[in-house]
Image (spheres, helix red, strand yellow):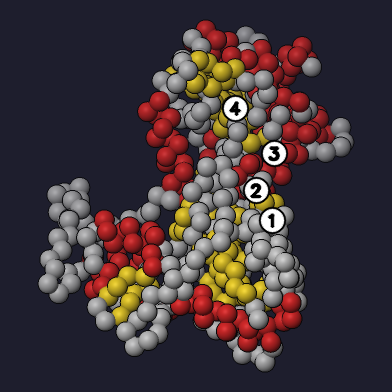
Amino acid sequence: MAVVREFTLPDLGEGLTEAEIVRWLVQVGDVVAVDQPVVEVETAKAMVEVPCPYGGVVTARFGEEGTELPVGAPLLTVAVGEPATGSCGGPESSGEGSGTPASPEGEGSGNVLVGYGTQAPAARRRRVRAVPGGSARSGGADAGAPAAGGERARQEAVDAGGAVRSGRSSGLLETAGAGTRAVISPLVRRLARERGLDLAQVRGSGPDGLITRADVERATAAPLPGRETAVPEVPSAVGGPESGAQRVPLRGVRGAVAEKLSRSRREIPDATCWVDADATELLAARRAMNAAGGPKVSLLAVLARITTAALARHPELNATVDTEAREIVRLPGVHLGFAAQTERGLVVPVVRDAHTLDTVQLSEEIARLTEAARTGGLTPAELTGGTFTLNNYGVFGVDGSTPIINHPEAAMLGVGRIAPKPWVWEGELAVRQVVQLSFTFDHRVCDGGTAGGFLRYVADCVERPAVLLRSM
């Protein structure tokens, strides 16, 4: 007969501890192959498709779309074929019905997920909490028998799935009088505790009575029988209650950005200096490069090449501060981050080893990362590990800014819009293409002289691109 395997949310790396279910890619009753993506989740850093290390029939899914799950929480269960003789309980093949081989338990499928292989979960004992009347209720959001089709694998999934549906750990069930209430999400239980809500008084709106976060929020928004709930008023600008206030959760990318920026403000004593520069010659040089044939180069790539040249002259700015050791750590390579605005919010993709790339290579890599950012295809590895950030806020039509440093980096170069302005050129007033450059730096790693020298070199390269020839 089939053996049911539980697949939990794996460690996605980079210190991530939870993820939000964005979209299920399989339904209960579907046949899945080893390493087939089964769910799309959003972490604080990227959208990730999670592959399942088992092949067989999906017998249950846990968690609705929009639910946040911690690492290690159940995602789904799969009925796989009979394990081979002599194995340690893990399936070596799917057997009859599943049609897909499954990897031995303990080894995982071998598929790499953001730098980590999909691993089989540790063996665990199942406990059944009986409901008065001699039955047990499901602890899964979509737990249920696979669609009838007469296939042996699906029938085995029904038989084996019963153990899963009735054998969820007691931590996923809350006693409610004469019956039970299914609570799949630890976040829902925590929210109920924080709001002083007894889940026995809540009627779940999900499948099989599953209590969702929305159920808890509705229950705490209005008084329940025998319980008085004080709803705090949000004062408006004129002192009255604000009836139309909207609350937006700080989670996912938005939450990660908020946390990082807050930490930067708390820990980094930053300072900013700026200068106006005549970018007319820089634009002319870029036009000449693109007119010469070959791959086109973007303006951001030209500015990135200027940045790496400036960091080669001022390596103390490519650094981080180790507060525990009270040391400045100067880094050997430049991993250049650049700010990109997407529908999911602000992200900072990182060009690895930017100091080794020429202008054309920088342009190609920036274009690739920008497209991945727009489609939500950036991996956590492509969003972390930066040592310096280039922020082109000029695309928003603004001249200047005092950006917050991307912790734990030590500096950020900002570029405003390039616009025609009156400028004294060769002793006469002329209309030139002028840009404002700003430089925010951690005052612990250098003094104003170093910061001013860096920014002045960048401005000189913008005004006279031939200056770059000295460092090439």
Q: Residue 387 shows which numbered tag?
A: 4
Instruction: Provide the residue designation for mark 3.
Output: 366
Q: Distance between the residues labelled 4 and 2?
A: 24 Å
Q: How far apart are marks 1 and 3 (CA)?
A: 37 Å
User: Tag 2: residue type?
Assistant: Tyr
User: Tag 1: residue type?
Assistant: Glu
User: Tag 4: residue type?
Assistant: Thr
Q: Tell me which residue sits at (45%, 27%) in the image.
A: 402
Residue 19 visible, this angle: no
Q: How many marks?
A: 4
- First in sequence: mark 4 or mark 2? 2
Q: Where is residue 248 in the image (x, y as percent from the top left)?
A: 37, 54
Callouts 1 and 3 close, C-beta under 8 Å:
no
Q: How far apart are marks 1 and 4 (CA)?
A: 36 Å
Residue most toward the front?
86
Front-most of residues 345 and 179: 179
Q: Distance between the residues labelled 3 and 4?
A: 16 Å
Q: Tell me which residue sits at (30%, 66%) in the image.
A: 216
- First in sequence: mark 1 or mark 3? 1
**Local crowd at mark 4 within 10 Å, few (<14), some, or many (≥20)?**
many
Instruction: Provide the residue designation for mark 2.
Output: 116
